[in-house]
Image (tube, rainbow, N blue to C red):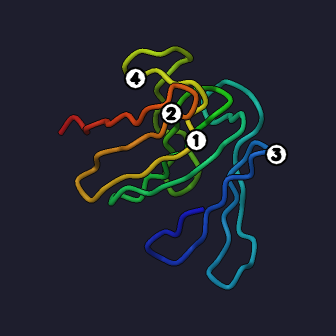
Amino acid sequence: MAVDSRGNVFVSDRDNANIQKFASNGNFITKWGSEGEGNGQLNQPAVVAFDSSGHLFVTDSGNHRVQVFDKNGNSVTKWGSEEKGDGQFSKPESIDVDRFGHVYVADTSNNNIQLFVPNN
């Protein structure tokens, strides 16, 4: 789970292939995502993290990729495919974004951590 700048809590629901948003008091607000491979669809979402712009990064483990959503749950971008090369994943499980926008992805089955730097 991750908390945004307003205190809302975002939780990846692995078994239901969605992201759920809750208010800081625990009240359900909304959810997005459905099972699949398309934009905004998820397959075993694992960990979520925010960047300083409020984009939500999700390790989409079953689809071997990372997806990025805006604060309203709209798909912004995605990257990755199932392999062992640079920018490819096999069951990515964890993710973090530092204050500079660098994205760190723990690629579980490939036993590595990959770093992605924004194109500013």
In this view of the protein, which residue sits in the foreground, 88 or 112?
Answer: 112
Mark toward the start of the polypeptide (1 vs 2): 1
**Residue 107 coordinates in the image, percent (x, y):** 50, 33
Question: Is residue 85 positioned above or below 60 on the image?
Answer: above
Q: CA distance from mark 4 to mark 3?
A: 26 Å
Label 3 near label 1: C-beta < 8 Å? no
| Few, some or many residues within 10 Å of mark 1 (<14, 14–19, 20+) | many
Label 2 near label 1: C-beta < 8 Å? yes
Callout 3 secondary element: loop
Mark toward the start of the polypeptide (4 vs 2): 4
- Quadrant location of residue 118? top left
**Residue 1 coordinates in the image, percent (x, y):** 60, 62
Residue position marked by numbered label 1 in the rendering = 93
In front: label 2 or label 3: 2
**Residue 37 coordinates in the image, percent (x, y):** 68, 24
Question: Is residue 26 positioned above or below 106 on the image?
Answer: below
Which residue is depicted at the point 56% across and 40% down? 59
Residue position marked by numbered label 4 in the rendering = 87
Which residue is depicted at the point 31% across and 56% down? 98
| Image disc number at residue 16 | 3
> What kind of residue is marked 4?
Gly
| Image disc number at residue 107 | 2
Label 3 near label 4: C-beta < 8 Å? no
In this view of the protein, which residue sits in the foreground, 106 or 47?
Answer: 106
